[in-house]
Image (spheres, rainbow, N blue to C red):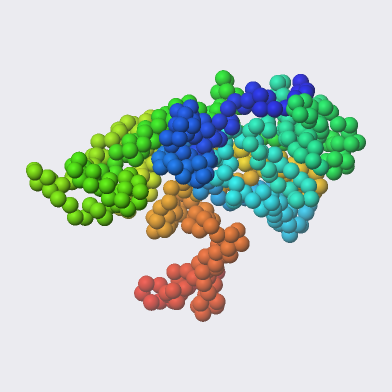
């Protein structure tokens, strides 16, 4: 069951995807546009959001709108942990799988195929700029409540493109999906629909183009004209024996009630508003009462006004220099400085309690936020100590990590399917994605941990080298493995004559009593 596109506007987006633009503003910190109490104070001129309204409107207003954007930390903390843990992407096919006795291909031919497979995966990773995408992908998935990935092959090369969830519209029967984009081409507004649908065991992809009028109503464009406008030779392609779409959708906290996922900021807007309101109200109180004020007697005030009137023609323009020398009253007092005790203003503890509630509901470690607030006395911590401090956030991040790795594997498999259309030697697979530690530890701890695993036989030499050098290139790792293996079998004069080094070689082929060892025939 496909979708008939007759109109496309914000109401269509909200019907399928909810208030994603609201949560984006919440994350970005555009709170003065969202919360009614802030809007009212801005309209009255009591506060100002200078970022939005600029200095022209704020020049007579001294109290800014104070924002403590906890909504920004909630998606960024797991994104920081997960993104730094994604390592290199390797083919899951070993050389042994290519080099089998039944295979008639030469060994070097098999090796070439394996190398080509890895090169294609590397090209996908490079063309997609994956190294720059991980953090943004996870933040966007958390804020919007979902993320879309689609493999693409054109003149820019084979790659994976990531889209926000508001372009994704699945078909009700689960057999297809539409990706919908509002575009402006040659000054005209169009609706570009890319559709993938499984039909008779094959995957059919097709492009549709619609004209959009001022009322956002969609009118179909004829195929020939659509080809010309989109610059495409064909609008439809069939991929035989492909029984699921190339497009992959990654929902956040998917449930039966919310099959497309929900934003991690859902239901946090009220608490965020209260935090901002309390801090801004405190700022207003301090602005009005926090500055020192000088109290003088009536006689002194009158004398100051007289001097101001005489000097400037305006008794309100009192010159502070006239206060430097003055007389005392009958009680020995001339002036008094009055200032409010700012420590008594507001209730910052109330703000902290709301922050804790937000962190609790979103499964975010309070210690992660403490790193931003105050690190006094923290000193150096081991990786184990950091792990337990961030336990809740790490548990959440590990779930996101496993989902994100699966998401990437599915997309790369789809991309390899496209590559196989042009090169039948390509193998369709889900590659291996290496994972690194989420939390930083010292170099010493890293080496000790991996060396111990290798010595105990629970970790191979290759994995040890990779984990000890997480940023090294594949070429460097292979060279390092070669160097290590070569050093294990260093040749000396004795070994060149008698063979590789053994215990008997070191004893010059003599027993413990110094007698020559007889060779058995």
Residue 395 in view: no
Closest to the observer, 53 or 279 = 53
Closest to the observer, 165 or 259 = 165
Above or below, 420 relative to 461: above
Query: Which residue extends farthest bottom?
Result: 493
Count how many numbered circles sit on residues in the image: 0
Direction from residue 467 to residue 295 in the image, left or right: left
**Percent of width and height locating residue 182:** 73, 35
Image point 44% across, 74% down: which residue?
506
Direction from residue 197 to residue 327 in the image, left or right: left
Image point 70% across, 21% down: which residue?
172
Query: Which residue extends farthest right?
Result: 224
**Percent of width and height locating residue 415:** 72, 43
**Percent of width and height locating residue 244:** 72, 31
**Percent of width and height locating residue 168:** 68, 31
Residue 260 position by quadrant: top right
Quarter of the image with the C terminus in it: bottom right
Closest to the observer, 297 or 433 = 297
Query: Which residue extends farthest left?
Result: 331
Direction from residue 328 to residue 484 in the image, left or right: right
Image point 59% across, 50% down: which residue?
132
Direction from residue 22 to residue 305 in the image, left or right: left
Above or below, 15 relative to 516: above
Quarter of the image with the N terminus in it: top right
Closest to the observer, 433 or 61 = 61
Image point 24% across, 39% down: which residue?
340
Residue 129 in view: yes
């Amino acid at each position: 069951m496909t979708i008939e596109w007759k109109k496309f506007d914000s109401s269509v987006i909200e019907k399928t995807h909810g208030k994603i633009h609201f949560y984006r503003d919440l994350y970005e910190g555009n709170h003065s546009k969202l919360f009614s109490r802030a809007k009212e104070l801005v309209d009255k001129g009591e506060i100002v959001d200078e970022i939005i309204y600029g200095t022209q409107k704020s020049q007579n207003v001294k109290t800014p709108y104070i924002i403590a954007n906890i909504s920004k930390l909630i998606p960024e903390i797991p994104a920081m942990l997960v993104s730094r843990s994604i390592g290199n992407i390797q083919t899951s096919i070993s050389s042994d799988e290519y080099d089998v006795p039944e295979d008639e291909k030469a060994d070097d031919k098999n090796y070439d195929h394996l190398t080509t497979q890895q090169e294609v995966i590397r090209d996908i990773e490079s063309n997609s700029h994956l190294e720059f995408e991980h953090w943004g992908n996870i933040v966007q998935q958390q804020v919007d409540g979902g993320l879309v990935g689609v493999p693409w092959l054109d003149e820019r090369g084979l790659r994976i493109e990531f889209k926000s969830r508001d372009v994704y519209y699945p078909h009700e029967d689960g057999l297809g999906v539409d990706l919908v984009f509002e575009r402006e081409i040659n000054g005209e507004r169009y609706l570009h629909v890319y559709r993938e649908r499984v039909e008779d065991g094959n995957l059919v992809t097709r492009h549709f183009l619609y004209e959009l009028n001022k009322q956002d109503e969609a009118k179909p464009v004829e195929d020939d004209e659509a080809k010309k406008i989109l610059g495409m030779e064909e609008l439809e392609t069939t991929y035989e024996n492909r029984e699921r779409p190339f497009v992959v959708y990654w929902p956040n906290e998917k449930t039966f009630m919310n099959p497309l996922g929900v934003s991690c900021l859902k239901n946090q807007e009220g608490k965020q508003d209260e935090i901002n309101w309390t801090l801004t109200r405190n700022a207003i109180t301090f602005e009005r009462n926090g500055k020192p004020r000088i109290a003088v007697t009536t006689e002194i005030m009158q004398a100051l006004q007289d001097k101001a009137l005489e000097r400037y023609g305006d008794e309100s323009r009192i010159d502070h220099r006239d206060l430097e020398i003055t007389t005392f009253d009958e009680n020995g007092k001339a002036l008094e400085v009055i200032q409010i005790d700012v420590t008594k203003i507001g209730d910052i503890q109330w703000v902290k309690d709301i922050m804790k509630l937000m962190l609790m509901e979103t499964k975010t470690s309070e210690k992660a936020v403490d790193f931003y607030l105050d690190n006094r006395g923290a000193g150096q911590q081991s990786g184990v100590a950091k792990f337990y401090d961030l336990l809740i956030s790490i548990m959440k991040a590990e779930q996101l990590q496993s989902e994100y790795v699966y998401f990437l594997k599915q997309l790369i498999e789809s991309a390899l399917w496209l590559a196989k259309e042009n090169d039948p030697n390509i193998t369709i697979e889900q590659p291996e994605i290496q994972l690194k530690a989420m939390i930083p530890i010292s170099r010493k701890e890293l080496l000790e941990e991996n060396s111990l695993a290798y010595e105990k036989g629970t970790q191979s030499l290759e994995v040890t080298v990779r984990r000890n050098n997480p940023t090294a290139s594949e070429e460097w790792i292979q060279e390092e493995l070669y160097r290590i293996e070569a050093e294990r079998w260093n040749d000396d004069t004795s070994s060149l004559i008698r063979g590789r080094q053994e215990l008997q070689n070191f004893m010059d082929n003599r027993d413990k009593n110094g007698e020559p060892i007889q060779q058995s025939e």
